[in-house]
Amino acid sequence: MDVSTALSWRRLGLLAAGLGLTIGGIVLGLIVLVALMAVLIVGLGLELSSQSLLILNLIAVQGVGFPVAGYAYLRYRGRRVWEFVPTALPNLRQVGVIVAGWIGALVLVSIAGVIIQVTGTTAAENQAGQVVTENPEFVPYLLPFVFLLNGPGEEFLFRGVIQGRFREEFGPAAAIVLATLMFAPIHVFSFVGATPQAALVTISILTVPSLIFGAVYEITDNFTVPALVHGLYNATLFGSIYLSSLVGVAGL
């Protein structure tokens, strides 16, 4: 086997590992979710609302599944976790990157939304967005989970671990794109009654913030930065729904 063939097989193996980590994190999260639901419903006799299920999903998948899958992979590879995924309090420059990434993601996604409206394209509805829209008073209780679990959990696996490994083999730019191709499609599981076309449109939109999360991680080499940008981005989306409900109640 020549060098180029060996390199190709190694890269294919790495891509397969990234896909396996993605699937493994989801499966592990679903196992934890089912276990939690069994305890609450069967063990304690509780009825779970859509809000409760959303929180349980965040705990199980983003709080347990993704981080544990990423941690286990790094330990299996003999890597020191917090050396491989550098984590620190952001300095002043990194705070600027956080703000720029947050605003940039919102602006670009808003532009994508306008394009969708102008072209008459239909996007898929997200389950979390549906729950929040129907229960806007739930948003203040949801936001801590967004910052503590949603952002950090997803960014640890997809930026810290997967993008970090891809960077070693493919370089930073390709790593950002490849990690995004792993990250954006997983949201298909949260779509509500979506057609294939609508699902594809929404996945395409989700690549925009994902590319920004990856870029700010490469710029700062600090896991805290994309975790906060991701948290701020999602919190702003949910917060806008909450504020709209307040304006509606006030009759403004």
Image: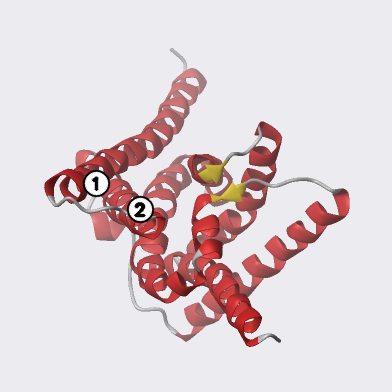
**Residue at label 1?**
37
Front position in the image: 155 or 49: 49
Secondary structure type for disc 2: helix
Front position in the image: 125 or 173: 125
* Residue 17 drawn above or below residue 175: above
Secondary structure type for disc 1: helix
Image position of 224 (left or right of 184): left
Task: Indicate which disc residue 227 carries.
Answer: none
* Image location of residue 205, percent across then percent down: 66, 51
| Residue under the image location 47 percent in, 74 percent down | 137
Few, some or many residues within 10 Å of mark 1 (<14, 14–19, 20+): many
| Residue under the image location 59 percent in, 76 percent down | 245
Task: Indicate the quadrant containing the C terminus: top left, top right, bottom left or bottom right.
Answer: bottom right
Image position of 214 (left or right of 107): left
| Residue under the image location 50 percent in, 60 percent down | 218
Front position in the image: 246 or 194: 246
Question: Residue flagged by tag 1: what amino acid is it?
Answer: Met
- Which circle's residue, 2 or 1, is located before the other in the chain? 1
Circles 2 and 1, Cβ within 8 Å, touching? The answer is yes
